[in-house]
Image (cartoon, grey):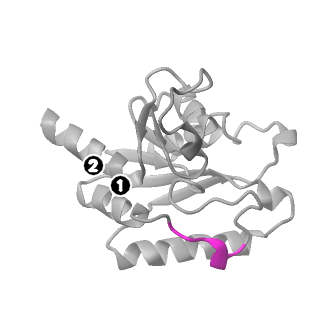
Amino acid sequence: MKLVILDRDGTINEDSADYIKHPDEWLPLPGALQAIARLNHAGWHVVVASNQSGLGRGLFDVSTLNAMHAKMHKLLAAVGGRVDAVFYCPHGPEEACRCRKPEPGLFEQIGERYGIDLRHVPVVGDTARDVVAGVAAGCEPHLVYTGKGAAFKDRSLPDTFPPGTRTHDDLAAFAEFLIQRETAGA
């Protein structure tokens, strides 16, 4: 099974310091949905792993989160793409749970759900905690220069990023890299 694990806010959609709290605030980044569709058409399954502490903070409820994801699924379907599943952590950092990135709990859940070893599965995010969580589960780290990742463009990544973290301008550039790599290896 060809699987890619993506962060949500700042990777697929615009991020906000005030949290994405309503479907109207969920706005896809330019080219992100098309990149997911391109991955799908190349045979990749796409899963989302996202911290959603706004739930635990009482900023929105599960039905609102589901409405945000329904909007994402609808917009993806319109461009011929899909996300197979969304895994999220509802906890705040003070709860010290195992599912909040940078802990690997969400990734372990994904591995269990799909019955696969996550070694070498690409994980894409816009922060160190996204890729650190994935690497702890064996994933291959990729940073996009969108969302919070924009702060790292044109400079060396700090030591908070795992060694070997690959960087890409955005999700479309990552999709191009992954498809080209697979084609070259075929």
Give the position of the C terminus as an image quadrant.
top left
Q: Quadrant of residue 95?
A: top right
- Given residues 166 and 77, the one toward you in this image is 166
User: Within the magenta stretch, is there residue 27?
Assistant: yes
Label at residue 71: none
> Which residue is label 2 attached to?
176
Mark-to-mark CA distance, 2 and 1: 6 Å
User: Is any part of residue 101 visible from this angle?
Assistant: yes
> Which residue is label 1 attached to?
172
Q: Secondary structure at mark 1?
A: helix
On the image, the x and y values in percent for residue 80 come to: 31, 72
Give the position of the N terminus as an image quadrant.
top left
User: Within the magenta stretch, is there residue 142?
Assistant: no
- Identity, as a three-letter code, of the amino acid under mark 1: Ala
Q: Secondary structure at mark 2?
A: helix
On the image, the x and y values in percent for residue 14 come to: 58, 62
Chain part drawn in magenta = 22-28
Q: Residue at x 71, y 42 (%)?
A: 100
- Given residues 34 and 97, the one toward you in this image is 34
- Identity, as a three-letter code, of the amino acid under mark 2: Glu
